[in-house]
Amino acid sequence: MTEYTQGVKLRTGKRKGFFRQLAGQWQLALMSVPMFLYVLLFNYVPMWGWINAFKDYGNRKLVARGITPYNGLANFKWLFSRPDFYQAIRNTLAMSVINLVFGTVSAILLAILLNEVRNRGFKRTVQTVTYLPHFLSMVIVVAMAQNIFATNGPINALLTGVGLAKTPIFWLGEGKYFWWLVGVINVWKEVGWGTIIYISAMTSIDPSLYEAAAIDGAGRFHRIMHVTLPGIRSTFIILLIMNIGHLMEAGFEIQYLLGNGLVASYSRTIDIFVLEYGIQQMDMGVATAAGMFKSVVAIILLVSANFIAKRLGEDTLV
């Protein structure tokens, strides 16, 4: 609201109410200062480095003398003329979608199954066993996967033993298997951790809804379909919007550690592309341009998903 007094414009209303509310909750505001500084220091200050995307690091003589001339959009033009960059985009999106679908579906299914379990001891044991892999280093997880999916590993022994495969499958050396292996490994590592959020959402569902459904003759499956799933719908939408914002981040560690020369065309993601050009070839301009492209696309995806959810009347982040 805006008021005019003797030609002077005074602002009242929302702004005054905001500062009054902030002053009334100064303890909470003070507690948020460290996190605000953390985000500012590690998320926004590094964005100053985006200026390197418009510099020429190809002239080694000038770079050695500490001179890096600006070259406009030349790095972006060179970037989008490279087939390996489009290949990295394809691999990143493919593995991100696989991880999103597999991870979301498996987390919801496991949460529903655990929510239906009445034995608390068994339920807690399963929860503990499933979310412990989240705390394992990716180096350990990849080492385990390499042994499990080796040519003479237990997976091939099982497949050949039951007659599903005549000869051992070269899981780690054929590109057509790589994306799916990454998806399976990520599900095994993160499904328990993702389940925690959905179980928490299910505990907030009013128990009277289950009782009313049971009185109406709904079985367990129908109660899940008409009470449990609608009850976690808002949580699912919020997590989906956030995950869509991370579609350009398929990961780095698992692709870098599990990949090899035989599957390089399937394992190279945008992050690995940045590593190859930024660290190995010392072309910081191209590497920064690739990272900048990934960030901008991620912001567009996040805003678009949030806008679509709002238009559909769903819960949104903003």
Image (cartoon, rainbow, N blue to C red):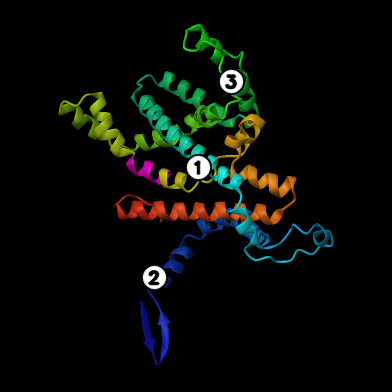
Compared with 31, 148 (above or below) is above
At mark 1, the secondary structure is helix
N-term-proximal mark, 2 vs 3: 2
Q: Quadrant of the N terminus?
A: bottom left
Q: Residue at x 47, y 64 (%)?
A: 22
Q: Height in image: 256 above or below 281? A: above
For the stretch drawn in magenta, what is the main secondary structure? helix
Question: Spatial distance from mark 2 to mark 3, Cα to Cα?
Answer: 64 Å
| Residue 203, image quadrant | top left
Q: Position of residue 224 (x, y in %)?
A: 28, 30
Residue carrying label 2: 14
Relative side of 118 to 302, left or right? left
Q: Which residue does the numbered mark 3 point to in the structure image?
A: 170
Of the two numbered discs 2 and 1 on the same chain, state the one appearing first in sequence: 2
Local crowd size for mark 2, using a 10 Å CA cut-off: few (<14), some (14–19), many (≥20): few
- Asked if the residue at tag 1 contacts the one at tag 3, i.e. Cβ–Cβ closer than 8 Å, the answer is no
Whether residue 234 is in magenta: the answer is yes
The stretch in magenta equals 233-239
Q: Earlier in the sequence, mark 3 or mark 1?
A: 1
The answer to whether one can see residue 231 in this image is yes
* Residue corresponding to mark 1: 93
* Circle 3: residue type: Phe
Q: Position of residue 59 (x, y in %)?
A: 78, 59
Nearest the viewer among 309 and 52 is 52
Percent x, y of residue 308: 35, 53
Quarter assignment of residue 144:
top right
